[in-house]
Image (tube, rainbow, N blue to C red):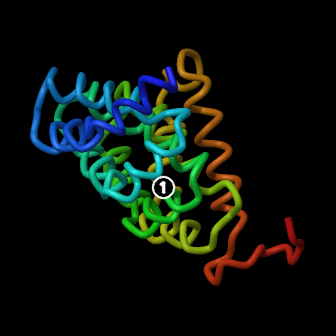
């Protein structure tokens, strides 16, 4: 696949896909996001180009898209980038993706919830003080506790439940000044 990704980058396909992702809707948007993800994942030069061209901001905006498939694909690629590229993670934090995700979680559980939660888990990994403050400021803890009250999380959506509990441990273990309240370093 790398040779195809290399050629796609060489011939400017990444720019075309990013443009389509920014302008299309519905099925065309979901397919464009899928193609963008295929063109970048596991190929560092394409990922770095996507990050440099503002792809992180585009992905964050798509978290508010009406199309559930588009939101899911955007979250999937966001998690990949945040996990593998510190500069992408920093951009997502600078754009306060935590607030965007918290707003979506407060709107109610849907098929994108698990993916949003996985993005949050990847962002709090390393316990960056900025992202932890964003979690507190956006009332993420309250949104997570509300999700945990849903009966379906107990039986059917165990991974979502686990993500919520993991996030609450991390953000709940911080005082308002960002320090660990029991005084221990992690």
Percent from the top left, x then y, of residue 45?
49, 45
Q: Where is residue 28 in the image (x, y as percent from the top left)?
A: 14, 24
Q: Is residue 72 visible?
A: no
**In this picture, is 48 found above or below 94?**
above
Q: Which is nearer the eye, 10 or 128?
A: 10
Residue 15: quadrant of the picture: top left
Q: Which residue is drawn at 64% across and 84% down?
A: 177
Q: Is residue 6 visible?
A: yes
Q: What element carries label 1?
A: helix
Is 86 positioned to the left or the right of 114 in the image? Answer: right
User: Extreme top residue here?
Assistant: 156
Residues packed near mark 1 inside 10 Å, few (<14), some (14 to 19) or many (20 plus): some
Measured as percent of width and height from the top left, residue 112 is found at 38, 31
Residue to which mark 1 is pinned: 142
In front here: 172 or 13? 13
Q: Tell me residue 94's x, y (percent).
A: 43, 70
Q: In which quarter of the image is residue 175?
A: bottom right
Q: In the rendered image of this protein, does residue 51 appear above or below residue 131?
A: above
Q: Residue at x 41, y 54 (%)?
A: 51
Residue lying furthest bottom = 177
The C terminus - image quarter: bottom right
Number of labels in the image equals 1
Which residue is pictured at 67% across the width and 54% down the height? 125
Q: Which residue is drawn at 13% across and 26% down?
A: 26
Is 174 situated above or below 120? below
């Amino acid at each position: 696949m790398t040779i195809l990704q290399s050629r796609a980058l060489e011939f400017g396909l990444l720019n075309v896909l990013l443009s389509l992702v920014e302008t299309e809707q519905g099925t065309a948007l979901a397919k464009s996001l899928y193609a963008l993800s295929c063109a970048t994942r596991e190929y560092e030069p394409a990922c770095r180009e996507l990050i440099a061209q503002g792809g992180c901001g585009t992905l964050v905006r798509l978290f508010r898209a009406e199309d559930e498939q588009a939101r899911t694909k955007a979250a999937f690629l966001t998690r990949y980038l945040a996990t593998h590229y510190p500069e992408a993670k920093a951009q997502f934090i600078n754009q306060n993706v935590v607030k965007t995700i918290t707003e979506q979680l407060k709107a109610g559980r849907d098929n994108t919830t698990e993916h949003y939660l996985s993005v949050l888990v990847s962002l709090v990994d390393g316990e960056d003080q900025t992202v932890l403050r964003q979690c507190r400021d956006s009332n993420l803890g309250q949104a997570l506790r509300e999700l945990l009250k849903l009966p379906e999380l107990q039986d059917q959506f165990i991974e979502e439940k686990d993500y919520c509990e993991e996030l609450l441990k991390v953000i709940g273990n911080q005082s308002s000044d960002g320090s660990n309240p029991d005084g221990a370093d992690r």
